[in-house]
Amino acid sequence: MSSPAQGLYKQLAFGKQTALGTPKVGAGGQLLRRKSSIFSATKDSTGNDEIVSHRQDTGITFGMKKTNGKIDGNLSSGSYSVLIAGAMMADFAAVTPVVVGTDCVSAATAPQFVDGSAGYLTAGLKVGDVVRFTGFTTTAVGNNSKNFWITALTAGNMTGIFLDGSAVVAKTETGSVTCTVVGKKAVVPLTGHTNDFFTFEEWYSDKSRSEVFPDCKVNQVTIGVPAAGPATLGLDIVGLGTRTLAATQSFTAPATETTTEVVQAANGAVYVDGVLVANATTLSLTIDRGISPIGASIGSSVSPDLNAGRIKVSGSFTAMFNDTALQALFDAGAAVSLCAVAAVDNSAMADFVGFSLGAVKLTGDAPDDGEKAIMRTYPFTAQLNAAGGAALAYDKTILTIQDSQAV
């Protein structure tokens, strides 16, 4: 008896296509770490609904083919940035470092960093950015090379926290200070949207069997940050259904999986309306593209393309109930900011993934009960932050994601 294929030996690889209808095969590709991945080729079917003398069903007729995929993993910096960018219709990009110069004043209390030239906003810094300073000298070298999360920002004043929990060292600096946004950021754009298609391959190495699914898009990204344990990521994939089966691996010598560590909530924070939610316990975030096949056409069993809806972003967070501040925001019904970051650990330059939503509306504040701390759940829906833009404290977008190791 032949033994069955086992998940431990299966490899999931993907590659970004140059265009629709041009599968990514051969050299290149990236192995993707996962908790699970399930890709299925499906077909529409219709019953024949015929009445005949033998009084028996005459079967079904097959229609349009489709691909459905689901990938579940733990969230780590750099591991999924290409696929997340596909959902956001924007590549991750680096931000030019800001030369603050010799007129930077640091303080232990807000604002922690003051730029005498008032150039923070024109340089492109935003609330929710994680930055690192270099150039502080003598007694203030402790401000250098640490993840500093910006929670409030004006042209000359920067307020925030070091993610390692240390305090800012006060000094009027005489050396030349530089402020660098860590890693790369993806911002859902107003124009110039990307249109990324991907090829996925599931390679069963113990059975030398390959399944290749080209012309796929990322339909949904779900981020989960629990109170304890690793942050999680789910990817919902939709494709046109032209699966290829083979006995050889399609991606030849794909790049090995990333090795960055998993981020977690214990080393992060959530700010709502510019205020730390000190008692937040969980956070979830969903990016929904509303992608589906356009539909079948005469002469083909495969849809010519995929429909894409507008980007929707929603989620929820839970918090221990100890005051009415969040309830008041729900009652007011106004759009407020929500920023969150999760890091690997509390070291000075730990890898992280951060999220910035300039305009969300809380849509509930339901409590629970029991012989325990009372929790309230605050679902939210994001919208385009029309008040953001160039030289302003927030991006003019529905969502910005920063990844310390994004590619």
Image: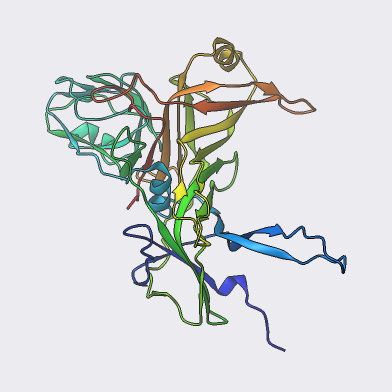
Q: Position of residue 131 (x, y in %)?
A: 30, 36
Q: Residue at x 40, y 68 (%)?
A: 256
Q: Residue furthest bottom?
A: 1
Q: Position of residue 179 (x, y in %)?
A: 22, 35
Q: Would you say residue 269 is visible in this rendering?
A: yes
Asked which colour scheme the image uses, the reply is: rainbow
Q: Position of residue 191 (x, y in %)?
A: 29, 35
Taking the image as shown, residue 143 lies to the left or right of residue 378, namely left
Q: Would you say residue 259 is visible in this rendering?
A: no
Question: Which sits in the foreground, 325 or 378?
Answer: 378
Taking the image as shown, residue 374 lies to the left or right of residue 291, namely right
**Tally of numbered tags:** 0
Above or below 22: residue 361: above
Q: Quadrant of the N terminus?
A: bottom right
Question: Which sits in the foreground, 162 or 126?
Answer: 126
Q: Residue at x 61, y 13 (%)?
A: 324
Q: Position of residue 203 (x, y in %)?
A: 51, 73
Taking the image as shown, residue 166 lies to the left or right of residue 53, namely left
